[in-house]
Image (cartoon, rainbow, N blue to C red):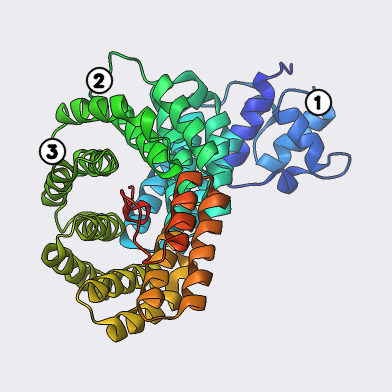
Amino acid sequence: MVEQPEFGRRVREIRSARGLSQSDIAGKGMSPSYISLVESGNRTPSPKVVRAIAERLGITPDELSSPAPRELRRTHRVELVGRLIAARSHQIAGDLGFARDELLDVIRQATDSGMDEILWEAHWELALTLGRLGQCDAREETLRQLLAAPLTESSPLLRARVAVETADLLRRSGRLSESVRLAEEALRSVPADETGAPERVQAQVSLLSGWLESGEWQRAAGLCDELLQSAGALHLGQLHATALWVAAEYRYVAGEQEQALALLDRALSLTGPEADIRVRVRMLWAAALLHLAADSEETAEELTERVGQAVALLGTHADAARVATLRALVALRRGAVERALEHAREAGRGREELPPIDRACCAVAVARTHRAAGRSADAEAEYQTAAALYEAAGAYRSASAVWRELSVPDGAPTTPDHSAIVTP
């Protein structure tokens, strides 16, 4: 006797455990789409069809009609968990292509078997892997699927985690208003009494970063204080360092330079050699720009060389553009205009791989170099590029600052210097 949806679930579990597709067990009078309907419980097969399915699965109709052995399901779950762990290890080791392909297969099998927890973890690991591969569109699609997953909907902390990851992706791709909206949603998802929860701190970091880049500084004061309080409840680590970093950026735009530099120097002291190279390079770049903006040239030059050393080992073309930008600005402060122009040319070659806001920052630095060299037309073109990038991202306050700098005869940047604001 066939009882749905239990029968369909057993067909799906046994088929997946044997590594078969729906096409493998389809045949005369049974299309893959019909098998899908049976497995979902939307079709009740006749005794003849039950016998045909059982034959293709290599079992008797009685075995198929009785509850699937728990051992079979447990074995399949253990196998998928093992493959998930292996894919995670390959991702950490840098074998990203293998990790992606393995995770996609785990997702397919976990979907067929209805193993929601494994499916969620595989999607999360896939999103991280796609991020390291630079496949932003596929990563966004994966994160959107996670946001809509029932497991995410039922867990406030999981929803906050996915919303923050998506918000950060949107911010780096220059979609600031969408990013801020998701970061606000993430922060609302975390219960108010979870003061020191990592998910709450991550949401606060993401939202404060979005407000800083979009120029909504007046909204950031209270959040900055809350973030520092929340971060203080954490054990020292990378998240604590990141919280101090973004708080430093707010202190800078609020006109509190000494506090800003102290916070950022503290953040760097908590970021050891074991930290993700991308995070370390970006934080060093942020610190160097902030020290330059505060006229602390010697420290900025020292930080620039530290960035250069890190990038020489494991950096990307985009990282090399960041280093060249810093070196151009340092040389400019030293009055070495020709050397600054050389570094500006290097920055121009690699900056297309930078995120939009970072690219705008680079364009401002190159514009200042051309202006110092008396190349007014080149400087104006770079200022216009920077303003267009800021405007497209929704960073209108920064765009206005660029237009003001272009219109000032001596080219003096506004205070605070918008191009010195680099968030996590």
Q: CA distance from mark 2 to mark 1?
A: 54 Å
**In the rendering, at what x and y percent does residue 26 appear?**
78, 43
Secondary structure, mark 3, is loop
Determine the residue positioned at 32% across, 55% down: 420
* Residue 397 versus residue 291 in the image, above or below: above
For disc 1, the marked residue is 45
In the image, taking residue 387 as reference, residue 64 lies left or right, namely right
Determine the residue positioned at 24% across, 41% down: 255
Q: CA distance from mark 1 to mark 3?
A: 59 Å
Query: Hey, which residue is sitting farthest top in the picture?
Result: 193
For disc 2, the marked residue is 195
**In the rendering, at what x and y percent does residue 200 appear?**
32, 27
Q: Residues within 10 Å of mark 3 (few under 14, many from 20)?
A: few
Residue 193 or 364: which is nearer the viewer? 364
Secondary structure, mark 2, is loop
The disc placed on residue 236 is 3
